[in-house]
Amino acid sequence: MSLQPLACIIPPDLLAAVAREADATQRQALLDTLQLDQSFRVVRAENAARTVETTRALTPRVGAGTPSRSIYDQKHSTATTPGTLARSEGQAPVADVSVNQAYDNFGYTYKLYWDIFHRDSIDDQGLPIEGLVHFGANYDNAFWDGAGHMFFGDGDGQMLTDTTKGIDVVGHELTHGVTQHEANLTYSGQSGALNESVSDVFGSLVKQYHLGQDVATADWLIGADIVGPQLAPALRSMKAPGTANHYDNQPATMDGYVHTTSDNGGVHTNSGIPNHAFYVIATTIGGNAWEAAGQIWYDTLVDPRLRPNATFSKFAALTLRSARTRYGASSNEAAAVKTGWDEVKVRVR
Amino acid sequence: MNLPGSTGDPSGLPDPAHPRDMSDAGLHVTYRRSGGIAGLDLVAECAGSDLPQDHARVARDLLDAPADEPGRGGTEREAAVVPAGADRFTYTVHITDGTRHRTLTWSEGAVPSAAEPLLASLGGLATPQRAP
Ligand SMILES: [Zn+2]
């Protein structure tokens, strides 16, 4: 199976046309305006840089602010097309706990993106959220298929348990969709580790926002609700990478960067480095992580300068740029960003 | 189950009197499943003679198949595999008969159906390992 770049369809919007014709200064102002009203990617499409672009409007979708969820029961099949529709948007809970957990956790994920970043679903255009539960037999995984579907296994009870139970896991998977529609970070090497880290960061923020936890009360663990005894207490720790379970060997700094051919170049291993940078930045700023630190990460993720093949250093430089743009060059937030990347030994350039 | 280029018993039926094929002597297979949201590596290693005969035959067929065999799938350079989506498993098998060696990698969802029983068999033997 190969990546399937979609046709780049650019809407003939006036603003987009203006941006195309504008000089550099005007263009930046337009970009900033569009970014603020969350229509950023219309202009970004003008940069003709992304593999996934869809027609998008400059005004909010009717019904924006409400997700459109469908949860399908795969009944332990490994079929990769949706199975039996078990619960759709607005319907009451059903008997199947996994269906309800997926439904609820997608709801919390949508809510973080909408409330905090004014993003309307995966594509910011209200893309229906499709979760496929009970995938496979004792399947120890959850994944994003690159085509709008999120799959959840029941786990074998030893490594993993029902993966729909993890609010951060559901947030992690949906965020892979967001990333694909934004920076489209290539799933290999450093850009792949960034892709993974972005999913952990926003997955953790979904959980923290839902639970009302500030940076001091959050546990900064990923997957604590879905691990079985073999991987307890969690899959990963953003606070202390490499300590989450017996098999966890995530590095926290570039000194421990793992060069491997496994897992597309250790994308779930080296993600510990940007994960820990985010943790340091969020805790240095203090308060709620989804506010300043989360905003800086979100601004970076939707920044057209973030290329699919971005390195840690390039991503770091763009987070610093985002912090300076939003909070000021001499702000505490910008200083915290510099501190975070210094701590994990990523050069900001 | 036989892949193009197979030299194994075309019947595909296990012989109850001789459940292990003598042609599997020297055949050795290692297996790694990496990735998934847990990022956990599972590994297994076994002699061809320890595999069910039909699964050992799949391994031998994979070893025998020409490098450009379309039905073989996979790639011999893991770095070349960039899967669609995220958090999918990556399977890597190394097969040798003592003389020839072949390493094959597939992303989950791109595993040729002929290789699926072998991967299932090896997956059943695999145990977690701290990622390298
Ligand atoms: Zn992931």
Image (tube, coloured by chain):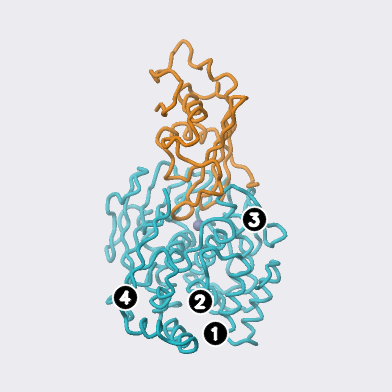
Chain colours: A cyan, B orange
Category of crowding for the residue at label 2, using alpha-carbon neighbours closer than 10 angstroms: few (below 14), some (14–19), many (at least 20) = many
Q: Which mark is residue A250?
A: 3
A244 or A301, nearer to the observer = A301
- Would you name the residue on which mark 1 appears? A326
Which residue is at 50% across, 16% downward? B21
Residue B90, position as x, y percentages in the image:
51, 45
- Spatial CA span between label 3 and label 4: 43 Å
Residue on which disc 4 sits: A11
Considering only order in the chain, which callout, 4 or 1, is on the residue closer to the N terminus?
4
Q: Are marks 2 and 4 on the same chain?
A: yes
Residue at disc 2, CB closer than 8 Å to ligand 1: no
Which residue shows up at 51% across the image and 59% down it? A186
Q: Are marks 2 and 3 in contact (CB under 8 Å)?
A: no
Q: Is residue A306 above or below residue B79?
A: below
- Quickly name the residue at label 2: A299
Mark 2 to mark 3 CA distance (whole Å): 26 Å
Residue B113 appears left or right of A84: right
Side (left or right) of A11 relative to B37: left
Q: Position of residue B73 (x, y in %)?
A: 45, 39
Alpha carbon separation for disc pair 1 and 2: 9 Å
